[in-house]
Image (cartoon, rainbow, N blue to C red):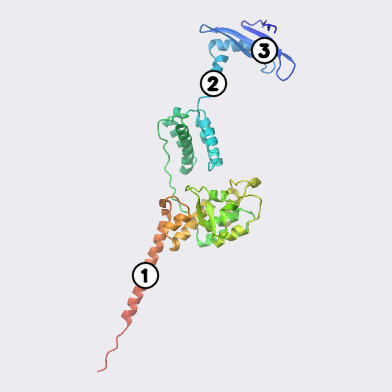
């Protein structure tokens, strides 16, 4: 193989060789720089004439910057890139976390939280490089525009990513606990009889094939939105009258009764080829229905802060608790709560019913006593 000839230029330390342009047969110059720095000699490629739009003058500028240390050498670039491959940044940990958990719940929501709030602040950082002040700044910044519950979910995702890196021994943690904002999650939504009547009327008049039926299913069964999204035909046992809820928030699969009202809703749904009861695009699992249910909420004149699906789950629980006919254990099972403490938010409704029942008992006894007092005993004849 003939020796490649180096062509000198008018710029000191700059030469080029002739080569073939990538992707064509056209000949082009490939420029190189030669220099010494810290006692070491460097002979490195600066770039191609066409592909990199390189010239002898540009190569000379690159050489000058490398001598002054303003630009790393090619060798330093390669070493840095190699080292970078072993650095587990927050972004890399998130990608690995998703890869290790392909069936993660709420992935779309978590991805949005990561891209919008975590990636811009910490994406390029390592877990161990985080300082408490960094997280504090993000928390304070978010709390100015977001609700505490939303901020908590964002920081909880960050904590989950960091813990994943530690547990898998990919990256050490920051060495401190992430402080979460205090959140009052005991909001219990309820509807008056009048508002509930208006809502049912709006549902019946709505043309969306799934929004109204989903809202009715929540009212009749207390199911969560995510559980309805995941609900498949194989989960409905019409013969025994049960619904199997896969991967509920509480953990293991649960079964809840399929009452007549819910059965009627399911029987009226249009038939599709999808395995899902409420399929999304292409018959795949649905991920959102916010716009459609909010339209119904608006038509029914419900309060702005009422959550169309989760709020109806509260209505379901509140009606049962206040009926006085369902104990807290049964309500816990119907709501698939993992802990009884989660159901206790409805206990006051049951207590009020018990108070009314107790007061009724007192009234009945008092009525008997008053009747007794009005009876005038007959005097015996003399």
Q: Is residue 317 above or below residue 15?
A: below
Answer left or right for 207 relative to 128: right
For the point 62% across and 46% down, which residue is it?
284
Answer left or right for 382 relative to 145: left
Residue 361 - label:
1
Per the model, the C-alpha gap separating discs 1 and 3 is 100 Å
Could you classify mark 3 by the number of other residues whose Cα lies within 10 Å: few (under 14), some (14-19), or many (20 or more)?
many
Could you classify mark 2 by the number of other residues whose Cα lies within 10 Å: few (under 14), some (14-19), or many (20 or more)?
few
Q: Is residue 202 or residue 273 the one in the foreground?
A: 273
Answer left or right for 354 relative to 31: left
Q: Secondary structure at mark 2?
A: helix
Q: Earlier in the sequence, mark 2 or mark 1?
A: 2
In front: label 2 or label 1: 2
The residue at which mark 3 appears reads as 30
Quarter holding the C terminus? bottom left
Per the model, the C-alpha gap separating discs 2 and 1 is 81 Å
Per the model, the C-alpha gap separating discs 3 and 2 is 25 Å
**Whether residue 291 is visible:** yes
Q: Earlier in the sequence, mark 1 or mark 3?
A: 3
Quarter holding the N terminus? top right
Q: Secondary structure at mark 1?
A: helix
Answer left or right for 74 relative to 7: left
């Amino acid at each position: 193989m003939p020796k490649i000839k180096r062509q000198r230029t008018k710029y000191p330390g700059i030469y080029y060789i002739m080569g073939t342009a990538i992707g064509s047969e056209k000949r082009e110059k490939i420029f190189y720089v030669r220099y010494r720095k810290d006692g070491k000699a460097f002979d490195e490629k600066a770039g191609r004439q066409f592909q990199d739009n390189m010239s002898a003058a540009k190569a000379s500028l690159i050489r000058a910057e490398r001598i002054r240390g303003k630009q790393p050498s090619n060798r330093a670039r390669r070493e840095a890139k190699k080292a970078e491959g072993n650095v587990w940044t927050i972004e890399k940990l998130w990608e690995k976390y998703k890869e290790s958990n392909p069936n993660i719940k709420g992935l779309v929501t978590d991805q949005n939280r990561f891209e919008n709030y975590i990636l811009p602040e910490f994406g390029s950082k390592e877990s161990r490089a985080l300082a408490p002040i960094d997280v504090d700044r993000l928390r304070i910044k978010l709390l100015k525009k977001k609700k505490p519950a939303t901020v908590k979910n964002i920081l909880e995702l960050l904590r989950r990513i960091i813990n994943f890196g530690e547990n898998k021994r990919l990256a050490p943690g920051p060495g401190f606990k992430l402080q979460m904002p205090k959140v009052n999650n005991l909001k219990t939504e309820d509807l008056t009889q009048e508002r509930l009547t208006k809502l049912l009327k709006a549902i019946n008049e709505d043309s969306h094939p799934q929004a109204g039926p989903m809202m009715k299913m929540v009212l009749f069964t207390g199911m969560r939105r995510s559980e309805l999204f995941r609900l498949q035909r194989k989960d409905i046992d019409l013969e025994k009258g049960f619904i199997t809820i896969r991967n509920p928030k509480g953990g293991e699969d649960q079964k809840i009764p399929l009452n007549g009202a819910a059965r009627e809703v399911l029987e009226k749904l249009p038939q599709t080829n999808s395995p899902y009861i409420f399929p999304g695009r292409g018959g795949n699992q649905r991920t959102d229905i916010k716009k459609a249910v909010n339209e119904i909420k608006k038509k029914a004149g419900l309060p702005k802060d009422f959550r169309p699906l989760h709020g109806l789950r509260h209505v379901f629980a509140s009606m049962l608790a206040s009926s006085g006919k369902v104990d807290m254990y049964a309500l816990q099972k119907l709501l698939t709560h993992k802990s009884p403490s989660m159901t206790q938010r409805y206990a006051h409704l049951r207590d009020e019913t018990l108070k009314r029942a107790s007061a009724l008992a007192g009234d009945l006894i008092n009525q008997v006593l008053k009747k007794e007092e009005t009876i005038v005993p007959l005097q015996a004849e003399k």
